[in-house]
Amino acid sequence: MPAKPIAALALLLAAAPALAQTQTPLERGGYLVKGPAACGQCHTNPAPGSPELGGGMRFAELAYTAVAANLTPDPDTGIAAWSDADLVNGLRNGKRPRGSLIGPPMPIAAYRGLSDGDANAIVVYLRSVKPAANKTARSGYRVPLPDSYGPAVTRVPEVSLADPVKYGEYLAHSVAACMQCHSRPLEGGGADLAAGLGAGGQSARGPAGAAVATNITPSGIGHYSDADLKKVITTGVRPDGSKLNPAMPYAYFANMSDADLSAVVAYLRVLPKR
């Protein structure tokens, strides 16, 4: 990306901390859940009349049949019994209160990088959602799950908004989990966030059929303008008019601020070509 747009974006984001400070944790959490984190993409059943974040969506893959959990504060079928610390630990370490592991497709590997402020803001918002009594089936895994996703994450500092590329990296990796889907798959499962970062190729089956993640390094998107990229991200429509598979949560990304979208685009521009 040319230097001048980066400089202009840096000036825009330099003013963002003051704006961010005016957001309450509830507002920030709502923005993340309904925007870049796109929690409802999996945890809100698309069937008409389904409650927000009430769970129940099924994900059938060769390795598992997973059912999205009820994230509402319902006392019997939701998260009401989880403490705030339990919920943050579930998000970042993939552990339930009794120690069992939360398996895929929940992108725990990405959420390990959620900052303390953002993780807690998400919890505040989940507490505010209308409780929905919806008992969901247990997920089943045909491959063994690991004992953990790594050493327990207990603290993650806030990411400065002043550097657009670093903030875009944070959004793409730890909030929107873009790189978990859009990086080349490893032979044993998971995403190659080193040699295959952003190279695409992972497939997933959803309600609209199979989808294969595209290359989002400059090799794959270098011919798109910034405006083109933002339109693709927020509408699911490419410049030629073709449409993305709705596995891409563009309806949620449409709720992202222009500054956040610009930061993500700035980060994608500096990825190594794959």
Image (cartoon, rainbow, N blue to C red):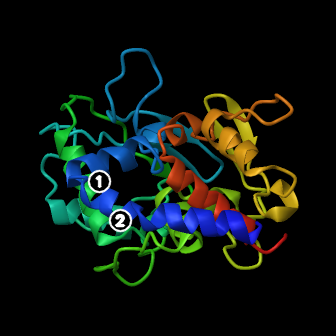
| Residue at the spot 12% in from the left edge and 39% down from the top edge | 75
**Residue 71 versus residue 274: which sits nearer the camera?**
274
**x%, y% of residue 122?**
29, 53
**x%, y% of residue 141?**
51, 54
**Residue 210 versus residue 168: which sits nearer the camera?**
168
Earlier sequence position, callout 2 versus callout 1: 2
| Residue at the spot 77% in from the left edge and 78% down from the top edge | 195
Quadrant of the rendered image containing residue 121: bottom left
| Residue at the spot 45% in from the left edge and 44% down from the top edge | 35
Above/below status of 126 relative to 53: below
**x%, y% of residue 30?**
31, 44
Above/below status of 261 relative to 88: above
Q: Return the residue found at the far bottom.
A: 151
Residue 55 visible to an observer of this rendering:
yes
What amino acid is at disc 1? Ile
Frontmost of labels 2 and 1 is 2
**x%, y% of residue 254?**
53, 37
Left/right of residue 132 with respect to residue 38 in the rendered view: left
What amino acid is at disc 2? Pro
Quadrant of the rendered image containing residue 119: bottom left
Quadrant of the rendered image containing residue 96: bottom left
Judging by the rendered image, the residue that carries numbered circle 1 is: 122
Judging by the rendered image, the residue that carries numbered circle 2 is: 17
**Residue 37 versus residue 149: which sits nearer the camera?**
37
Judged from the image, the secondary structure of the residue bearing numbered disc 2 is helix
The N terminus lies in quadrant? bottom right
Judged from the image, the secondary structure of the residue bearing numbered disc 1 is helix
